[in-house]
Amino acid sequence: METPKDLVGLGRDELAAEMKAMGAEPFRARQLWHWIYNRGVTDTALMTTLSKSFRAELAQRYRVGRPGVARALTSVDGTRKWLLRFDDGQEAECVHIPEEDRGTLCVSSQVGCTLTCKFCHTGTQRLVRNLSAAEIVGQVMLARDALGEWPSPQDDRQLTNIVLMGMGEPLYNYDNVAKALKIVMDGEGLSLSRRKITLSTSGVVPMIGRCGAELGVNLAISLHAVTDELRDVLVPLNKKYPLAELLDACRSYPGSSNARRITFEYVMLKGVNDSPAEARALVRLLAGIPAKVNLIPFNPWPGAPFERSSETSIKAFSDIVNAAGYSSPVRTPRGEDIMAACGQLKSDSVKRRKSDLLKEPATAPV
Ligand code: SAH
Ligand code: SF4
């Protein structure tokens, strides 16, 4: 039997069109939207504002889906990672990072990534495909399920922020990412403000302006080097869109201001990009951009050709950037014991031997 069509991931217009095709009144689409995205209900039988016969008809034609979970791990620091398995068997990862005053969900946009940044585990994965809008929104809904956050609460949320910093390059899958984020930002549904959403890109220059104008989310740029020579090696996309073009796109990013700064991510690689001279060059590069810098100590993965910079050199780098007036916090690695930290995501569970799985520390199935 064919799997019924998933209602999750349909935009408001599409949902309205489905209801129209069923001969339902237009306000049904709005009610359904509320049940799906505000209440988190997956069983149409429980949608009690709809008539029984209508619920039965919905159940026949549609489903309200979630991504499958192949594995769920919890770190000693409370970070949770879900290895998602989609209908075609492809996998991606999603991570929830609880902090004192907020909780951030790190969402994937692709299975794997076609870009091959030298320090990134995801970039070594062979299989790549775009995630659909349903698979992207589904990550947020799955996290809400796991955190027990339905109906969409306004206060005291454990899921307050979203970062598109999981697997994949979101601006290479712009249409689906945009569709998913519009659903996530809808005030009658999941209701997360664009100010709480950050999209990270390795520098797909032609899409940056559109992202700002259409979505208005916060922008993060994976910079990692201050010369084209080094960035060409670390982030090969730089050969296509070199630093000058990338920084120009940042200068004209719609909506950026001193109150809403662009984040520049900078992975600290020992002896590669972590000298005081590079910190000073970074400050010069950022002139004229409302910026903040996020220093990410390199997170190792099996076979990685880099080492993490020493604490002393990270501190010295950060001090120089700070002294120039840019905030430059060092990102504390989270969920390292479950390989959930930045750049450690890779969905290769199929290839892993059982003996490896048994060795894994701190696992706690949900
Ligand atoms: N593809 C997008 C989104 C991924 S974001 C991008 O590259 O921006 C993940 C962030 O973690 C990026 O800044 C990425 O460069 C960084 N990163 C990748 N591998 C890392 C590693 N091993 N250690 C620390 N940070 C890493
Ligand atoms: Fe892809 Fe980002 Fe990893 Fe580069 S850092 S390979 S763009 S996921």
Image (cartoon, rainbow, N blue to C red):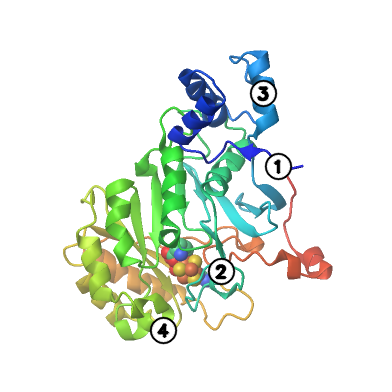
Query: Residue drawn 57% across and 73% down?
Result: 300
**Sequence-wise, which precedes: disc 4 or disc 2?**
2
Q: Which residue is mark 3?
A: 57
In three-dimensional space, the C-alpha distance between marks 1 and 3, rounded to whole angstroms, equals 15 Å
Q: Quadrant of the C terminus?
A: top right
Q: Give coordinates of residue 334: x percent, y percent.
A: 55, 58
User: Considering the numbered disc 2 on the image, is that residue within a helix, a strand or a loop?
Assistant: helix
Determine crowd level at label 4: few under 14, some 14-19, many 20+ residues with C-alpha closer than 10 A. Answer: some
In three-dimensional space, the C-alpha distance between marks 2 and 3, rounded to whole angstroms, equals 42 Å
Q: Give coordinates of residue 317: x percent, y percent.
A: 34, 73
Q: Which residue is mark 2?
A: 122
The residue at label 4 has a CB less than 8 Å from ligand 2: no
Checking the image for residue 233, the label placed there is: 4
User: Considering the numbered disc 3 on the image, is that residue within a helix, a strand or a loop?
Assistant: helix
Indicate which label's residue lies in the foreground, 1 or 4.
1
In three-dimensional space, the C-alpha distance between marks 2 and 1, rounded to whole angstroms, equals 30 Å
Question: Residue 291's image quarter?
Answer: bottom left
**Sequence-wise, which precedes: disc 1 or disc 3?**
1
In this rendering, would 20 be left or right of 364?
left
Checking the image for residue 3, the label placed there is: 1
**Sequence-wise, which precedes: disc 2 or disc 1?**
1
Indicate which label's residue lies in the foreground, 4 or 3.
3
The residue at label 2 has a CB less than 8 Å from ligand 2: yes
